[in-house]
Amino acid sequence: MNYGTYLRTVSIDLKLAHWLKNELGSAHDKVQVINLGCGSDLRMLSFLASYSNIEWIDLDYEEVVTFKATILQNNAKFRAALRIEGKRPEDSPSFENVITGRYKLLPCNIIDNEQLTPILRQYSNSDVPTVILTECVLCYLDETKASDLITTITNIYKDGYWISYDPIGGSGSNDRFGSIMQDNLRESRQLNMPTLMVFNSEDKYKDRFPGTSYIETMWDYYQNQLDEAERQRLKTLQFLDEIEELQVIFSHYVICCTSWNFKPSH
Ligand SMILES: C[S@@+](CC[C@H](N)C(=O)[O-])C[C@H]1O[C@@H](n2cnc3c(N)ncnc32)[C@H](O)[C@@H]1O
């Protein structure tokens, strides 16, 4: 694991854990976490084990979900941790989504509202406090589709918290980070990040969300949130000779946390 992956994982985990511990009315209150574009992320395992009040929904394209579900369903430890019952995929003629009491892994194109809204209505409760995770996902979506997604989600859930992690292109006049990244991604992986240069600064990224938002770059996170002992520990795990290079890279990744509460006041 390199510095970037470490910071990305730890910062999201700590923001989520902090919110669960401090922002819920009571530690026993029900809460649901919805990971949009979950990929192969397995952080639901540790959160479901640590917080008995959580229900977790992972959504991604069908092929990603099928791959992840096959791995979860075929592995005894994952089956036990998630309480997956029924046949293993290798013993079963047809594929089944993972749907257990507290965990759902479902195929969904998250920018297709005709898929997304019915799934959320069926498998989640709009009255329950809800955490949305988008980790390196919004950057891949078209600007209007991403904006519609944010509107849809914040309209469904009255009380929510959105943790989003993404690269930003950079807004300085000499900043070529974003354009170089876009060129490299197109050439090497035929991938497009349509909004990398649209939401290219912390303020622009944060302002796409309604409610109260807090954003920081991974460089700020590295400088301010990690204590010296942890920074030293990291240095022993990965040799680091170019701190300036690290600063340039980390200044172009952000974690943004947005809270909203549209519950009617009595
Ligand atoms: C870079 S990966 C990040 C995966 C995961 N969030 C993580 O950080 O480990 C982006 C993920 O978003 C998913 N994704 C992108 N657009 C999507 C869409 N329209 N509907 C569902 N999933 C989507 C991709 O399939 C992929 O799994």
Image: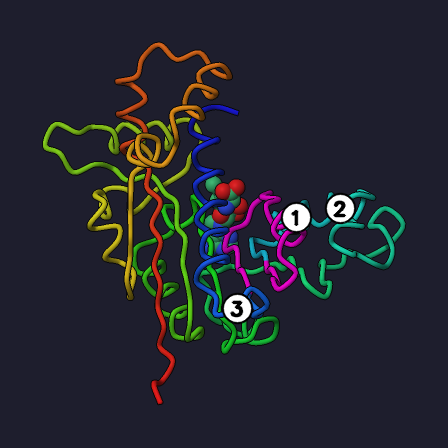
- Residue closest to the eye, 72 or 46: 46
N-terminal of the two: label 3 or label 1?
3
- Neighbor class of circle 1 (other Cα within 10 Å; few <14, some 14-19, many 20+) is some
Q: What amino acid does circle 2 point to?
A: Phe
- Neighbor class of circle 3 (other Cα within 10 Å; few <14, some 14-19, many 20+) is few
The image quadrant that residue 264 belongs to is bottom left
Q: Quadrant of the C terminus?
A: bottom left
Q: How far apart are marks 1 and 2 (CA)?
A: 8 Å
Q: Residue at label 2? A: 78
Residue at 43 percent across and 33 percent down: it is: 7
Q: Residue at label 3? A: 26
Q: Position of residue 243 (x, y in %)?
A: 30, 17
Secondary structure of the residue carrying tag 2 is: helix
- Neighbor class of circle 2 (other Cα within 10 Å; few <14, some 14-19, many 20+) is some
Q: Which residue lies furthest to the bottom in this view?
A: 266
Residue at 52 percent across and 68 percent down: it is: 26
Residues drawn in magenta? 32-57
Q: What amino acid does circle 3 point to?
A: Ser
Q: Where is residue 152 in the image (x, y as percent from the top left)?
A: 40, 70
Q: Do the numbered discs 1 and 2 sit on residues whose CB atoms are within 8 Å?
A: yes
Q: Do the numbered discs 3 and 1 sit on residues whose CB atoms are within 8 Å?
A: no
Q: Position of residue 244 (x, y in %)?
A: 26, 18
Q: Do the numbered discs 2 and 3 sit on residues whose CB atoms are within 8 Å?
A: no
Coloration of the structure image: rainbow
Q: Residue at label 1? A: 45
